[in-house]
Image (cartoon, helix red, strand yellow):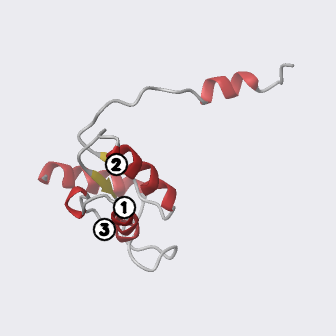
C-alpha cells in the first residue's frame, strides 16, 4: 500500500557507501551515540582521527568535546587519535573552529 508521503521518505533517506577519510568529524552535541558511531568507524579503520567539536554547554558538566572524548576513550579510541576543539558554542563555530584545528594538524 502506498502512502501520500512515501515520495518524501524516498527523497530524504538514502544510503551511501562510507569511504576511508582523514578524520571523522562530530560537529558538537551531548549525545553519546555520536561518539559511539565515530568510535565504531574508527575501529573499522575508516579514519585515523576523530574530531569532536564543542565548548561548554548546560547539557553536560564539561565541554561537549571533553564529554565526547571521554566516551571515545572508554570505547578504546586512543587519546592521541582524538583531536581537540573545545571552544565552539554553535554549529557555525563548530565548523569554523574545526577547520582551524584540521589546518594545525
Q: Secondary structure at mark 1?
A: helix
In the picture shown, does residue 46 fall above or below 71? above
For this view, does 28 lie left or right of residue 76?
right
Q: Which mark, residue 25?
A: 2
Q: Nearer the viewer, residue 81 or 55?
A: 81
- The mark lying in front, picked from 3 and 1, is 1
For this view, does 62 lie left or right of residue 48?
right
In the picture shown, does residue 105 fall above or below 12? below
- Circle 2 crowding by C-alpha within 10 Å: few under 14, some 14–19, many from 20: some
Q: Secondary structure at mark 3?
A: loop
Residue located farthest toward the right when viewing the structure as drawn: 1
Task: Tell me the residue that label 1 is attached to.
Answer: 72
Residue at image point 87% right, 19% down? 1
Q: Which mark, residue 87?
A: 3
- Circle 1 crowding by C-alpha within 10 Å: few under 14, some 14–19, many from 20: many
Residue 102 is situated, as x and y percent measured from the top left of the image, at 20, 50
Mark 3 vs mark 2: which is more N-terminal? 2
Residue 11 is situated, as x and y percent measured from the top left of the image, at 62, 24
Residue 58 is situated, as x and y percent measured from the top left of the image, at 50, 76
Q: Nearer the viewer, residue 88 or 63?
A: 63
Amino acid at each position: 500500500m502506498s502512502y501520500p508521503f512515501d515520495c518524501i521518505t524516498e527523497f530524504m533517506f538514502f544510503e551511501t557507501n562510507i569511504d576511508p577519510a582523514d578524520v571523522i568529524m562530530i560537529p558538537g552535541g551531548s549525545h553519546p551515540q555520536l561518539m559511539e558511531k565515530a568510535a565504531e568507524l574508527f575501529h573499522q579503520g575508516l579514519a585515523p582521527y576523530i574530531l569532536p567539536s564543542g565548548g561548554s554547554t548546560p547539557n553536560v558538566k564539561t565541554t561537549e568535546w571533553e564529554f565526547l572524548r571521554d566516551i571515545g576513550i572508554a570505547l578504546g579510541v586512543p587519546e592521541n587519535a582524538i583531536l581537540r576543539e573545545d571552544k565552539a558554542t554553535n554549529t557555525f563555530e563548530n565548523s569554523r573552529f574545526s577547520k582551524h584545528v584540521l589546518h594545525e594538524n
